[in-house]
Amino acid sequence: MKRLLIEIALLALISGCTSSKKAGLMAGEKKLTDVAYGSFPSSKMDVYLPANRNAQTPFVILIHGGAWLWGDKQSDTPTQDSLLAHGIACANINYRFVDTLQTHYPQMLADIDSAVNYCIAHASEWNTRKDKFIISGASAGGHLSLLYGYTTNKKISAIIAECPATDLTDTAVLNYEAKIGLLQAIHKMTNAIYTPGQPLGPEFAASSPIYHVKNIPTLIIHGNGDRTVPYSQSVDLDKKLTAKNIIHKLITIPGADHDLNLKDPATKNMVYKEVVDWAWKYGK
């Protein structure tokens, strides 16, 4: 009997050591690159997991910009590094680009959803959360972050959008985008054609975040000197969120163009701090 008790104690000790070792490995910092989250060649993401994470750790889904036509997750690696350094988990994704045939905003949203589903499916393995993700992006990524966050049935804890298009029914903006050569990209994204003087198809409102706003804390960052996406787009969203009494914040960067003047160290530090603070405040 005494020997049996000793054996049981040893087994418990070994099991406890194994569990502690496993927990320690799971709690260590991890960087997973080019993880395939879907079946398309573009369905790749980098996943950065901070040390000592758990199911309460904020988790950001990061969506790069590029006019819905180009770009790569590597452009957002500095943002992902900053999030990791501040104890925030992040999946930085690539996705399908729009074309004239079969890839438009619904397919892009489906890619984001596939990435979120992959993160949910691996939550136990990664020791991360299974819901209440933060959706974040700049430019086209900002537009997609807002549109996905406001239209998905999943629980999204917060949205962060930098210099996003928010209202594609604004014909003044559409005329401006035609002048700078970006209207064709909007045509591909919406799968609809804008002709001056003609009524807009329903696709323009359907792909506009401002028509889908939901009670999700939303951080908007935009330069009032933006020559690609007019600053008025963020002002209009700010007004809509204010009218609906939704928690949000519009940060205006004086004189900044579409790049938010991030080459300036002071501006970059300010933007990164606002993003980190928003993630920690609303991402739990």
Image: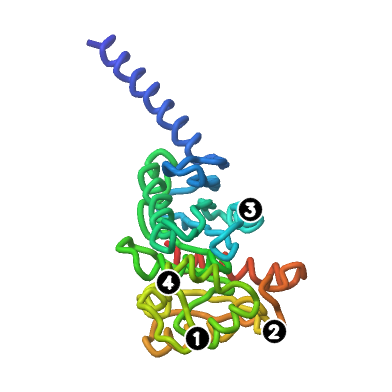
Q: Residue at x 41, y 72 (%)?
A: 207
Which color scheme did the rendering employ for the protein? rainbow
Q: Which one is in front, 225 or 30?
A: 225
Label 1 environment density (alpha carbons within 10 Å; few <14, some 14–19, many ≥20): few
Marks 1 and 4, Cα distance to the nearest angstrom?
A: 13 Å
Q: Quadrant of the N terminus?
A: top left
- Regarding mark 2 in the picture, which secondary structure is present there? loop
Distance from Cα at disc 1 to Cα at disc 2: 32 Å
224 or 274, nearer to the observer: 224
Amino acid of disc 3 = Thr
The crowding category of the residue bearing disc 2, from other C-alpha atoms within 10 Å (few below 14, some 14 to 19, many at least 20), is few
| Sequence-earlier tag: 3 or 1 | 3
Q: What whole-number distance in Å separates the C-alpha atoms at marks 4 and 2?
A: 34 Å
Q: Secondary structure at mark 1?
A: loop
Q: Earlier in the sequence, mark 1 or mark 2?
A: 1
Q: Position of residue 130 (x, y in %)?
A: 36, 51
Q: Residue at x 56, y 60 (%)?
A: 69
- Disc 4 + disc 3, Cβ < 8 Å: no
Q: Which percent across, then down, holds residue 13?
A: 38, 23
Judged from this view, the residue extending furthest toward the right is 264
Residue tagged 2: 254
Q: Secondary structure at mark 4?
A: loop
Q: Which residue is label 4 attached to? A: 192
Q: Are marks 3 and 1 in contact (CB under 8 Å)?
A: no
Quadrant (top left/top right/bottom left/bottom right) for the C terminus:
bottom left
Rendered image: mark on residue 77: 3
Q: Tell me if residue 44 comes above or below residue 69 in the rendering.
A: above
3 or 1: mark nearer the eye? 1
Residue 171 horizontal/vertical position (percent): 50, 86
Distance Cα–Cα, label 3 vs label 2:
25 Å
Whole-angstrom CA distance, mark 3 to mark 1, is: 39 Å
Question: What amino acid does circle 4 point to?
Answer: Ala
